[in-house]
Amino acid sequence: MKFKKYGVIIVGTGISGIYAALNLSDKLSVLMLSKRELTLCNSALAQGGVAAVMDKDNDNPELHIKDTLVAGQYKNNLDNVKILVEQGPNDVKRLADVYGVDFDRNADGSLALTLEGGHSRRRIAHHKDTTGYEIETNLIEQVQKLKNVSVINNSVLCRLERENGVFFADVIVNDEKGGISHEYYCSENVILATGGIGRVYAYTTNSAIATGDGIRLAYDLGAKIENLSYVQFHPTAFADRKNQECFLISEAVRGEGAYLLNCRKERFMPNYEPERKELAPRDVVSACIMEEEKKTGSNDFWLDISHKDPEFVKNRFPMIYKNVLEKGYDMTKEPIPIYPCQHYLMGGINVDGKGATNIEGLYAAGECSHTGVHGKNRLASNSLLEALVFSRLIAEDINSHSEKINVSEMEYNMPDPAQFTETLPEGIVAEVREIMQNAYFVFPNYPEAEKGLARIKQLREMLERGNYKLTPEFVETKSLVTVAYIILTEVLERKDEK
C-alpha cells in the first residue's frame, strides 16, 4: 500500500491546528485534515475572548499566574503556566498586527479588555461575543495562502500506526454524495489538534466533531493520557433541554454585571461566595448551582443582565442577544434560563513545554492536549491562549530539527479496509452518553460510575474484537467508548482523593 509522505500532518483545523501551520517552516510540506468544514470546531464557538496581560499599567503576569492557579485548585503545571502567561501577549499582538484579527478597542485605540470569572483584572481581549470565530476565520484566510499547506475537508483519521519513526495514517474522505473513500498518508511528525470530548455527554456546548478521536488514537499508540476526568461543566449554558448541543451564554455576560437567580428569581451566589459572587471560577459556580438546586428542589435557574443599558447589552453581546431572542427571551428586558453543561476538558494527551508527547514525532495541541496549564478547572479565556502559545512552540520545535521535505511516497503494509465487513450495532453512542450523564455531572456519582464502567468495558471489548466496517460512525463510536472508559476509570481511582 502506498502512502503519500508529508513533512507534517496536522489533524484538526481549529485555532491550534491552523496557528501551528502558520508557524511551520515553508520548507515543509504540510497536510491538514479537517473532519468537516474548516470552521466547524470548538474554536469557532468561543465567545468570551483570549486572556493575556495586555494592559501592563493595571495588570501583570504574576496576577494572571495567580488567578490561573487559584482557578485550577493549584493542580496546574507551574512551568507551563509561566510559559502561557509570559509568552501569550506576543501571540495575541500577532493576531491583531500580523493576521488582522479585529479586537474591540477603546476610543484611544487601546484594546477594550473585559472581565470574566476568576480574573482579578480586565485582561480579556475580544471581538464582540464571537472572538473565536473572528480569530479562526482570519487564520484560515492566511493559511489558505500558503503554498506548502494542503487541506482536506470532510476527512476522518481512522487508523494511525507507527513504524521506524514514521506515522502511517488511514484517512476516510467523505464525498459530496455521501460516499467514502480511503486515502493514505505518512509523516515523521504528527500534530493532533482534534479538540474536546463533549459528545461523550448527553448535553454539551461542544460542536458535533468533539468526539475525542485524537485522544483515542494517541492512547492506542501508547501515548500517556493524563487527567481525563478533569472535565469542566460551564454554569451558564442556555437551558434548552431539548437539544444535545447547548448554546453557551458567555462568561463575559457575568463579567459585565449579570446576576445568577434561582427558581424564585432571587440572587443566590453572595450566599455561597460573598466576595467573588457571580465572578467565582466556573467549577465553583456550577457547584453552587447544584447546592441551590438541593435547597430549592428546582432546577430552574436564570441569568439576568436586564438592569444594564439595553444598547450596551446589544452592542456587547450581539450574537448571544440574537440567539436567545430567537428562543423567546429578550435579555435586555428579562432573565434568561441557564443550567450547567459539559463544556471543556482540562486533561488529555500529556505533553511537555514544547507540546511533545512521550512518542517521538507525536505532538498534541489545544483541548485534546494536557499541558497542565488549567489544573483541575480552566480559568475563563485561557483556552485560546493555550491553543496559540503551545501550537507555535510545537511548530518551532519541528522547525528546529526538520530539513526541507517535499511530498513523496512510501510503502507500508496496513490491512485493507475491505476486510472489515460487520455493521456497527445501533444505540451505542446514546447509551454511552446516558452513562456519562448519570455517572459524572458536576460531581461524580460513584455507584453509577461503577455500574457504567462495567458496561463501558463490555462495549469496548466488543468494538476491539469485532470486525466492523471502517466508517466515520465507527471511528467516533470507538473514540467515545475509549474516552468514557478512561474518564470513569480515573473517577473511581480518585474516589478517595480530597
Image (cartoon, rainbow, N blue to C red):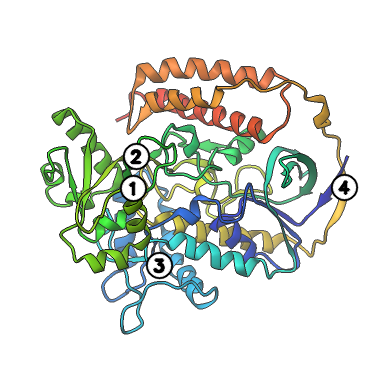
* Amino acid type of the residue that numbered disc 4 sits on in the rendered structure: Met
Helix, strand or loop at disc 4? strand
Residue 270 image position (x, y, % from top left) = 12, 47
Q: Is residue 414 left or right of residue 177?
A: right
Residue linked to disc 1: 327
Residue linked to disc 2: 240
Say if residue 187 shows up in the picture. yes
Query: Viewer-nearest of labels 4 and 2?
Result: 2
Figure check: 438 above or below 312 = above
Residue 272 image position (x, y, % from top left) = 14, 41
Query: Viewer-nearest of labels 1 and 4?
Result: 1
The residue nearer to you, when weighing 185 against 104, is 104
Q: Earlier in the sequence, mark 1 or mark 3?
A: 3
* Amino acid type of the residue that numbered disc 3 sits on in the rendered structure: His
Residue 84 image position (x, y, % from top left) = 44, 59
* Amino acid type of the residue that numbered disc 2 sits on in the rendered structure: Asp
How many numbered discs sit on the rendered protein?
A: 4
Query: Viewer-nearest of labels 2 and 3?
Result: 2
Within-10-Å neighbours for mark 3: few <14, some 14–19, many 20+: many
The residue nearer to you, when weighing 423 against 255, is 423
Residue linked to disc 4: 410
On-image quarter of the C terminus: top left
Residue at mark 1 to residue at mark 4: CA–CA distance:
54 Å
Residue at mark 2 to residue at mark 3: CA–CA distance:
26 Å
Q: Which residue is located at x 45 percent, y 65 percent?
A: 88
Using the image, tell me which numbered label, if any, was put on residue 127: 3
Query: Viewer-nearest of labels 1 and 2?
Result: 1
Pointer 1 and pointer 2: residues touching (CB < 8 Å)?
yes
Query: Viewer-nearest of labels 1 and 3?
Result: 1
Q: Earlier in the sequence, mark 1 or mark 4?
A: 1
